[in-house]
Amino acid sequence: MNVEGAWVIQEREAETVERPSLRLLADAGHTGGRLGANRLSLEPGAAGARPHFHERSAEAFFVISGSLRMLIGTEAVTVEAGGYAVIPPGVHHAFAATADAGADVLVTIAPGVERFAYFRQLPDVLAGRLPEAEVAAMHERYDVHFVPSPAWDAERG
């Protein structure tokens, strides 16, 4: 709901995408391009996103509960409940829930990029149900650039 140019959404109104479990809170169109936000819920040990970077936006992770294992550049760190990580544009990063705890995370990207359409297609992307050329075009359009990372591969076993 727009109120005086502000975006307000209640949890019960947020669209949910499964696998990974995402609640879509604000897309760039809702905020005048200022930011985008979603709430990510991961089971213990579950993968979040493999190593990638964004050229145009910073991405911030606030861990509401549980703990999030992150690769930032080439260093692996754990962000515990109440912790916050801000990843500048161009910095490679990845994330997953730690093996002993799930993670409930508020993820914000600024400036915003229209990504809800991407998140809606993410289950098909992850399952390999879309043509490779289509996936590559989506990643370019939504500013998600995947990279190889031996450090993350070693971290995840």
Image: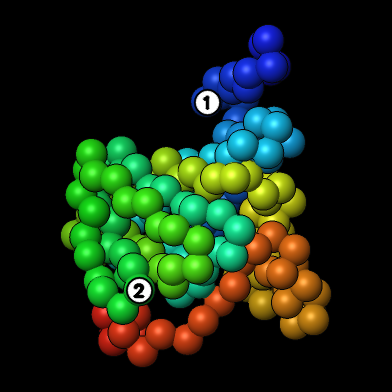
User: How far apart are the two marked residues, 2 and 1, measured between alpha carbons?
Assistant: 33 Å
Dot 2: element: loop
Answer left or right for 136 relative to 152.
right
From the viewer's side, name the closer residue of 30 and 101: 30
Answer left or right for 54 relative to 118.
left
* Residue 36 versus residue 85 in the image, above or below: above
Q: Residue 107 — which label? A: none
Q: Residue at x 56, y 54 (%)?
A: 57
Q: Which residue is mark 2?
A: 73
Q: Residue at x 67, y 11 (%)?
A: 3
Please state which amino acid type lies under the numbered disc 1.
Answer: Glu
Q: Earlier in the sequence, mark 2 or mark 1?
A: 1
* Residue 43 versus residue 152 in the image, above or below: above
Q: Which residue is mark 1?
A: 11
- x and y percentages locating residue 4 in the rendered image: 68, 10
Please state which amino acid type lies under the numbered disc 2.
Answer: Gly
